[in-house]
Image (tube, rainbow, N blue to C red):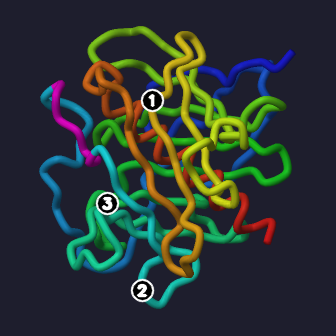
């Protein structure tokens, strides 16, 4: 029987990872401080997860992931391929680098401060995720691939202490009645209710677009921003894992 990943734990930035012994151990020598980036920082008054209006959504309901210009590793989040105003930048770092595998920046600029990071262990198929809650606090979580899902994680819902488990699962052919069967698709489900809260679709022919993500839940504000950051980071981790395999 597969065990769920451990829940969030709020901790100072200099504290090492503390995961449940039931989960696969993930060792890391990376510093526990926020990643340093060269160049000018682009201040974003919305970058903190604290003091946000409960109905605020950092991500639009539907958006795409695209390779950054002149890059086959870094990614931008934008509304469409020709959008001159990208929403966020995701920098990718090889496992030999001291930086986390993926850094979701708070603006379209690679030099801006991080919103969240994902450190992928390609051996154990686990991902250590950090959400930068404030300058002195990091929300830490772990996700993992299981026998029944591409990735599972536990997220704290908005405005309460309730934790719920979510899983990214492949959409099989019998569920692709109205779509192209050659198209890779996934759904993010709430493991408790079975509700599909997000989907991801890979385009049939595109060298730059990695796919499109949609938040599906009608009660999106109840899930909260931490859930949405976890959803995006786990999806990006799946895509990065597949890219490394190629």
Upstream in sequence: badge 3 or badge 2: 2
Which residue: 75% across, 38% down? 145
Tell me: residue 23, above or below residue 135.
Answer: above
Q: Which residue in the protein does label 3 denote?
A: 113
Q: Which residue in the protein does label 1 denote?
A: 197
Tell me: residue 221, above or below residue 27.
Answer: above
Tell me: residue 58, above or below residue 10.
Answer: below
Residue 105, percent across and down? 36, 60
Numbered disc 2: secondary structure: loop
Q: Which quadrant would residue 55 be assigned to in this image?
A: top left
Magenta part of the chain = 54-60
In space, the residues marked 3 and 1 are separated at their CA atoms by: 28 Å
Q: Kindly give the residue lying farthest to the front in the view shown.
A: 178
Tag 3 near tag 1, CB within 8 Å: no
Front residue of 30 and 124: 124
Numbered disc 1: secondary structure: strand
């Amino acid at each position: 029987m597969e065990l769920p990943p451990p829940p969030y734990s709020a901790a100072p930035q200099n504290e090492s990872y503390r995961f449940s012994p039931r989960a696969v151990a993930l060792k890391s020598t990376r510093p526990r401080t926020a990643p340093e980036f060269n160049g000018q920082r682009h201040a974003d008054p919305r970058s903190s997860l604290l003091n946000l209006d409960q109905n605020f959504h950092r991500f639009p309901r539907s958006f795409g992931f695209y390779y950054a210009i002149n890059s086959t590793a870094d990614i931008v989040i934008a509304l469409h391929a020709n959008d001159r105003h990208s929403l966020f930048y995701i920098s990718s770092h090889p496992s030999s680098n001291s930086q986390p595998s993926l850094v979701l920046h708070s603006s379209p600029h690679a030099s801006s401060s991080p919103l969240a990071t994902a450190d992928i262990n390609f051996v154990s198929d686990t991902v250590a995720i950090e959400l930068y809650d404030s300058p002195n606090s990091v929300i830490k979580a772990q996700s993992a691939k299981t026998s029944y899902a591409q990735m599972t994680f536990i997220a704290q819902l908005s405005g309460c202490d309730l934790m719920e488990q979510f899983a990214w699962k492949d959409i099989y052919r019998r569920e692709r009645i109205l779509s192209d069967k050659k198209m890779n698709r996934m759904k993010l489900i709430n493991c408790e209710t079975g509700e599909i809260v997000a989907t991801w679709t890979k385009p049939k022919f595109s060298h730059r677009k990695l796919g499109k993500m949609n938040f599906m839940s009608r009660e999106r504000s109840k899930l909260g921003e931490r859930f949405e950051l976890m959803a995006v980071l786990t999806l990006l981790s799946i895509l990065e894992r597949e890219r490394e395999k190629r």
